[in-house]
Amino acid sequence: MALLIRGGRIVTATDDYVADIFCAAETITRIEEGLETADLGVNPEELEIIDASGRYVFPGFIDPHVHIHLPFMGTHAADDYESASRAALAGGTTTLIEMICPGPNDEPWEAFELWRSKAKGISAVDFTFHMSVVRFEPEIREQFSRIVAAGVPSFKVFLAYKGALDLSDADLFAAMKFARELGVIVTAHCENAAVIDAMQQDLLAQGKTGPEWHGPSRPPVVEASGVHHICSFAALTRAHVYTVHTSCEEAVREALAARQRGVDVWIEAVAPHLVLDESYPSRGEFEGAKYVMSPPLRARKNQEILWNRLSTRAISTIGTDHAPFRFADQKTMGRDAFTKIPNGIPTLQERIDLVHTYGVNAGQISLQTMVDACSAQPAQIFGLYPRKGTIQLGSDADLVVYDPAYRGVFSQGTSHSRADYSAYEGWERIGRPAIVTVRGEIQAFDGEFVGTMGRGVFLEREPTH
Ligand code: URP
Ligand code: ZN
Ligand code: ZN
């Protein structure tokens, strides 16, 4: 079926105009004003026409940081590619970049194959990965070369999660030198694992066991120190780095100072840090556990800084760090000690509407910045542009017809994630994706999945750094 989207306001990172978009098959083939159906060369019965007047038409959104298959902290994240696809598409996201997070004894190539098998033939959105390096002995390096050659030219390193995912400095340095040689960007969770572990033990010893102590166990200086650390290694190795879920003024300042010194560093913010603050993990009845993520939710003043640095484009991207754990039987694993609460907040479905409501409508960022941060920059930084991330001839027909007049609320009841709560329950929501296409086929309509499971493809990328 060919697709004609008529009269929408096309908003990309660089353009804002009204025109029609025609997609003969999976890609965008014409963008013009007043396209006549008779001129399209398709049988009218094989043409789907969408009236987008009064609506925005965005390039499909890309989430550069999600966890779907995630064995973590003694349990597994609650979603799979079926629920995650529904959530992504309902929220206007058409491409996922998932973190492959193997355990410290796993073989990297096997992990890559396992994670790919969880998505292939199941996902309804297109997908690719960042490959976590949790160990880096000489004998396994060849496996990382193969993973890069197979289309995954981005690494993930954790400075946090002692004994689980964290990498020694010797391995970190070697991995970054290797990344530089291969032209691979290194994405990094920047918090010092040893310091956090010591502070957590101190707090527990004082009987401070509730979720409200998660934040104090990893204050902003711990994250800033992690950013300084990765940027120092980047200066030494000349590797390109990307600080994931950068949450606070101190951490952003470290990254920008490194950039001033010539380090190639990109900064990611994630939606929870933009809209939730440190008061949430203190909610009574253990409800605070729903809001435990790392780095932790910060003092409210940091939100202003993050929005501001997004508006100046110092922060490049907005992801989610979607890491869904059920409250009933997973978050409650940490009733006796906050250190056992699985870290993460589900936000995959909500990201774009949160950014539209609390970023664009609140006057924090422009519509074009929203598109840049949530689509164009993830595509550019991670080697997907211009196939993804924009609306131009030859790009994949991943399109979001967005209704800015919609008014509603965020709620678990309308969420497709398998988490059993919404961190944004009852919050005002302005705007929603009305129609979402992936490579020319309609996959979601007014928040409901109407597409084909398994249609998503693995996006093989080339090293660009
Ligand atoms: O709390 C978080 N962020 N959970 C997911 C794992 C990670 O650190 O990204
Ligand atoms: Zn992380
Ligand atoms: Zn993450």
Image: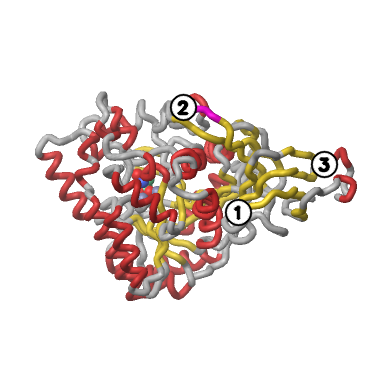
Q: Amino acid at mark 2?
A: Gln
Instruction: Tell me which residue sits at (43%, 26%) in the image.
Output: 426
Q: Which residues are magenta?
A: 407-411
- Can residue 114 be seen? no
Estimate the spatial distance between the alpha carbons at disc 3 and disc 2, rounded to whole Å.
36 Å
Badge 2 marks a residue whose secondary structure is helix
**Residue, disc 1:** 12
Q: Amino acid at mark 3?
A: Leu
In the image, taking residue 334 as reference, residue 309 lies left or right, namely right
Residue 98 location (% of width, % of height): 48, 50
Estimate the spatial distance between the alpha carbons at disc 1 and disc 2, rounded to whole Å.
30 Å
Q: Disc 1 vs disc 2: which is toward the camera?
A: 1
Query: Sequence order check: which comes first, mark 1 or mark 3?
Result: 1
In the image, taking residue 254 as reference, residue 95 lies left or right, namely right
Instruction: Tell me which residue sits at (77%, 53%) in the image.
Output: 32
Q: Amino acid at mark 1?
A: Thr
Badge 3 marks a residue whose secondary structure is strand
Residue 162 location (% of width, % of height): 26, 52
Residue 455 is one of the magenta-drawn residues: no
Does the CB distance between marks 3 and 2 fall below 8 Å?
Answer: no
Residue in the foreground of this view, choosing between 162 and 96: 96
- Can residue 387 be seen? yes
Residue in the foreground of this view, choosing between 43 and 35: 35
**Residue, disc 2:** 412
Instruction: Tell me which residue sits at (75%, 48%) in the image.
Output: 20
**Residue, disc 3:** 47
Residue 123 location (% of width, % of height): 59, 43
Residue in the foreground of this view, choosing between 352 and 106: 352
Estimate the spatial distance between the alpha carbons at disc 1 and disc 3, rounded to whole Å.
25 Å
Badge 1 marks a residue whose secondary structure is loop
The answer to whether 327 is drawn above or below residue 275 in the figure is: above
